[in-house]
Image (cartoon, rainbow, N blue to C red):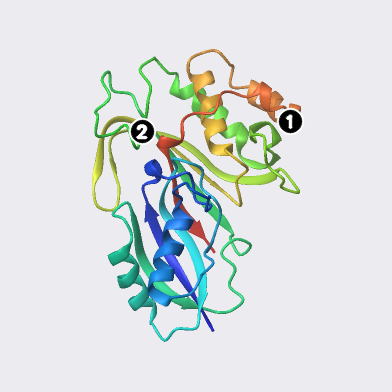
């Protein structure tokens, strides 16, 4: 028995999130189906975490166990020949038995993209949230600074989670204005706002709820200083709305 780690990239538009679901397409279910075609055995794929419906990944990590003699490179090639074009295995390697893609994570990094063009390109709607109104980005950056550090982010967690603690350490929360954002193989034309968040872990829809709150700050509906009060309240209703999933990318998982 050996354990294979996959570095995955996917466009989440056509999927109901990572987790396998009966009668609905998911990232996990699609890859496990391909693994069954390769090995002839039911295989359980475990990821660093679940991405929600419509969320993308530039660097998701997942592992599975196998008794076959296929090499990691064989698995990479076979999976990429069977998977739909919106899911790709960028790299595969054998890892020690005790490697855990979920509990071994030290940090995760997410980005969220907002397109501020007057007219949203039809080629960008899958990957950016379109925002036409004015935004005070300086105020939004001040609000970001309040979020940094080890804090209880319960107010930014959506309902339906069963985590034991809502305390997380946010190492980075930045906003950049860009005219072009480069992915691995292509670029998106702006004007864009690129939100970057790096933490030791994230709560359910935490990034999308933070971005929604920062937009409230940017449009003048919420003073930057109110972020401290929202954090202290622990009340999801005090924070801003949840922005759409299409602008969110899991960029990197750090072990």
Image quarter (top left, top right, bottom left or bottom right) of the N terminus: bottom right
Q: Where's residue 177, x and y in %?
A: 35, 31
Q: Where's residue 225, x and y in %?
A: 63, 22
Task: Compare marks 2 and 1 and give the one earlier in the sequence.
Answer: 2
Report the residue at 57% width, 38% height from top: 205
Numbered badge on residue 246: none
Crowdedness near tag 2: few (<14), some (14–19) or many (≥20) residues, C-alpha within 10 Å? many
The residue at which mark 2 appears reads as: 128
The residue at which mark 1 appears reads as: 234
Report the residue at 42% width, 69% height from top: 35
Q: Nearer the viewer, residue 161 or 37?
A: 37
Q: Nearer the viewer, residue 190 or 96?
A: 96
Q: Is residue 37 above or below residue 227?
A: below
Q: Where's residue 164, x and y in %?
A: 76, 49
Q: Is residue 58 above or below residue 63?
A: above
Q: Where's residue 12, x and y in %?
A: 40, 45
Rendered image quadrant of residue 126: top left
Considering every residue shown, the one lying at the far front of the view is 23
Considering every residue shown, the one lying at the far bottom of the view is 69
Report the residue at 31% width, 64% height from top: 82
Q: Nearer the viewer, residue 92 or 87?
A: 87
Report the residue at 53% width, 20% height from top: 217
Rendered image quadrant of residue 156: top right
For discs 2 and 1, the disc positioned in front in the rendered view? 2
Image quarter (top left, top right, bottom left or bottom right) of the C terminus: bottom right
Crowdedness near tag 1: few (<14), some (14–19) or many (≥20) residues, C-alpha within 10 Å? some
Asked whether the beta carbons under mark 2 and mark 1 sit within 8 Å of each other, the answer is no
């Amino acid at each position: 028995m050996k354990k294979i780690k996959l570095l995955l990239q996917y466009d989440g538009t056509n999927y109901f999130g990572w987790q396998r679901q009966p009668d609905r397409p998911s990232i996990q279910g699609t890859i496990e189906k391909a693994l069954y075609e390769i090995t002839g055995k039911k295989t359980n794929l475990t990821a660093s975490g679940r991405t929600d419906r419509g969320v993308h990944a530039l660097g998701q990590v997942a592992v599975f166990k196998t008794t076959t003699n296929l090499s990691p490179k064989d698995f990479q090639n076979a999976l990429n020949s069977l998977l739909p074009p919106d899911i790709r295995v960028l790299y595969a390697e054998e890892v020690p038995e005790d490697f855990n893609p979920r509990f071994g994570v030290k940090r995760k990094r997410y980005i969220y993209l907002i397109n501020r063009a007057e007219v949203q390109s039809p080629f960008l709607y899958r990957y950016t949230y379109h925002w036409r109104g004015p935004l005070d980005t300086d105020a939004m950056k001040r609000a970001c600074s309040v979020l940094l550090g080890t804090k209880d982010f319960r107010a930014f967690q959506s309902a339906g989670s069963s985590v034991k603690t809502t305390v997380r350490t946010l190492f980075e929360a930045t906003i950049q204005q860009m005219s072009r954002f480069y992915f691995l193989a292509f670029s998106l034309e702006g004007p864009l706002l690129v939100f970057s968040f790096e933490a030791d872990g994230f709560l359910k829809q935490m990034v999308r709820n933070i971005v929604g709150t920062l937009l409230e700050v940017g449009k003048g509906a919420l003073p930057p200083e109110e972020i401290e009060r929202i954090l202290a309240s622990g009340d999801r209703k005090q924070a801003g709305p949840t922005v759409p999933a299409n602008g969110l990318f899991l960029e990197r998982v750090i072990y």
